[in-house]
Amino acid sequence: MSRLPFVKILLPHIFIASIFLFYFYPVLFEGKVFFFRDISHFAYPMKLYLARVWELGEWPFWYPHLVQGIPFLQQMHPGVFYPPSVLFLMKDFNLAFQAYFLLHHFILTISVYVLCRYWGNSLQASLCAAVTSLLGGYFLSIAAVYNHFQSAVWFPLILMMWQKYLEKYQTKYFLYTAIFLAFQVLGGGPEHAIFSVLLIYAYGLCLTKENSLIRNSVAILSLVLLALALSAIQWIPTYFFKQKLPYGSGLDLVASTKWSLNFDTLFDLFLPDNQTRFMEIVGAKVNSFLHNFYMGIVPIVILFFSLLVYRENRAIRFWLAVFGWGVFFGLGEFNPLYSLFHQWMPIFNLFRYPQKFFFLCSFALVFLLCFSLDHLIDEVQRNRQKIKQLLFVVFIIFLCVAVVFWINPRRGGFETLVILMLIAMAVIALHHKKITPSKFLNFMLVLILMDLMIKNSMTVPMIDKEFYTKPPVLAKHIGGTADSFRVYSGLLLEAKSNSNHEKKESRNVSTQAWKPVHNLLAWHLKKRNQLYPNAGTIYDVAYVDGMTTRYLESTLRWSKWFVASDIPGKKIILKRSNVKFWIIEEPHQSLLELNQRKTYKVEVFEDTLPRAFLVGDSVTMPKEQMLDFYFDPRFDPLKQVLLTESVAVKKAEDFSGQVVDIQYPPNKVNLKTRQNGEGFLVLLDTFFPGWEVRVDGKPQPIYRANYFYRAVKLGPGTHSIEFSYVPVGLKMGIYISVSAWVLILFMFFKPARVNP
């Protein structure tokens, strides 16, 4: 192929950049910010905490502001060691936050274009694939579930580097593949790393010259081991963390198949729900992992045409199979064979939400579009039978769209029907040589752009930056209290007698987050204004509950006990969990009125337990019996502490003690105390492996206290106590990852052929 002039090389990138700037114009130039779904209650608070801890020159291992303290690094999705997180070293956090999301959209779009060009596809077909990846419903939707998005975007680069390695057997391409695969793990999406490995393994066997099973298997195994070594600093602490979780050994089938694809959802591939101002539609809600599946009507036409015509083409046949497998596993509970994979396939039961398998479908549609558009030109021009088949496909899809549109007019099928007719006209014009192949591809690009802009323009909601930067009224009064007291925001419901309801609520610590709302925008505003978890953490508010991706056994136990208690019992639980402020939810007031008034009732518990205090006596009992005593109104936690093991203490006749000072630097708790006899310091923070304590510089054991918390034995006098946290497995992960990165640097500077 002759070398293209520089301008022709530059123009496609300018085109992609222009579409990118146009779609994200509000973020880039109008001060809008991303806030939908996980972005507002996971991404923003946790990335902000990451930035604040880095500013202090530390690493964030522990998150003290949620569920009375929880591991931070091991959650994976904060991306502590994820390389693009270096953006949060910028002084302007809000700028860094927006740049972080935009960077990933840009990486995905450009890498798809470059990969398609590497495969030898035409410039226009490659642009069609790139635009579909930028504006496709899957990629825009998954951005709101940010850790999955920041992992998925690396797949095109992984595939391209792996193909180059299999073709040239140069060490650098093997290393690049391992690095990008490690990025997927570090980004917090291990499922996508698994998908990527399986795809490139199958790709190597089906579509490369070197399709030796043994050679490819050894190469993939070596690649996986190297990628795991590079990312060991993340996944090894996470592995040890998961062993302490209630479902560390796997999820049951019901929990694993929540949010499966259903047959109604598959209609969204042809005609999606109307996304225009969907945040303001009364009764709208998000009850699925993916908000929008629509990848465009042109890719769907190409998919079915390829199924009829191009089955002899290996590349097209491969991506058709990938799409089929994505649907097969994505159906989850609606697939009778899914339970067999859940039961017998290793680690299959560790992952939730079968809709995640749409990862396979989305990339298959993008790459099928690219390959088939170029093949379609030749078929349409020289084969009358093929054009009949293509027009038949368009006609059948036209009927399907018309039926769906007739059943549900709100889906806005008129535009799709027009586009289908334009496709048919363009195909006929190409066949009769009324337009050139280049103009036909340009027309397809315009149709794809028009279609996705109309259908998916509102899939990524944006709001004024004051949503984060301007503290709500409550934050001005309660913010800054995280080191002293906790907050509970929501209803105090009567005890539920329905055991199934209790089981459901016990899984979700922040039960109020599942209340019905008038519309999604009002709900997001209320969540912010009422300081629902986790919104208030950005204003230095600590919660007794909260939303995390992984809940500790003690957290679920607290939630279940809380849900099952009556109102007086709930208040006792809150007070004995260091909750001073109860932000009362008013269920009968409209969200619109509430958001406009921005006033909320707050009950202040004056007799709540302090974060840390001293007691002179202990009672030993099994852990299972502790909560009956601890939450009993007759028990005085300021006099005694409940321990799971017997600790000898010389009781003072008139014990007294005081916590003089308490501070929360990253991963630590520093206290100063004084007392007149032997006793215990009780700290109302989560008891969890990895915490150590030094009393006056000497290590001391930490005892499990009052079921949830920590206690340390102290002698009479003044003391300086330092709790410090290092995740279990972190040192092992550091040694392995550092060694792997040193090896990679050595291999880059000393290139050698890899012979798997």
Image (tube, rainbow, N blue to C red):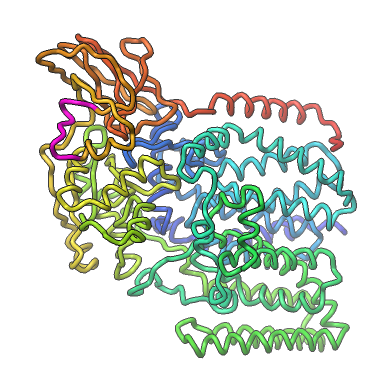
Q: Quadrant of residue 271?
A: bottom right
Which stretch is magenta?
632-641
Q: Is residue 687 left or right of residue 270?
A: left
In this view of the protein, which residue sits in the foreground, 46 or 340?
A: 340
Residue under the point 30% across and 17% down: 647
Q: Position of residue 292 (x, y in %)?
A: 52, 68
In this view of the protein, which residue sits in the foreground, 283 or 550?
A: 550
* Tally of numbered tags: 0
**Is 712 within the magenta?**
no
Q: Position of residue 605 (x, y in %)?
A: 13, 42
Quarter of the image with the N terminus in it:
bottom right
Magenta segment's dominant SS is loop
Q: Quadrant of residue 577?
A: top left
Residue under the point 41% across and 44% down: 551
Q: Position of residue 408 (x, y in %)?
A: 47, 85
User: In the picture shown, does residue 546 fall above or below 121?
Assistant: above
Q: Position of residue 668 (x, y in %)?
A: 36, 25
User: In the picture shown, does residue 105 fall above or below 137?
Assistant: above
Quarter of the image with the C terminus in it:
top right
Q: Is residue 473 left or right of residue 32?
A: left
Q: Is residue 130 left or right of residue 148?
A: right
In this view of the protein, which residue sits in the foreground, 14 or 334?
A: 334
Q: Is residue 12 left or right of residue 622?
A: right
Q: Is residue 111 visible?
A: yes
Q: Is residue 451 visible?
A: no
User: In the picture shown, does residue 364 fall above or below 451?
Assistant: above
Residue under the point 61% across and 24% down: 735
**Is 637 within the magenta?**
yes
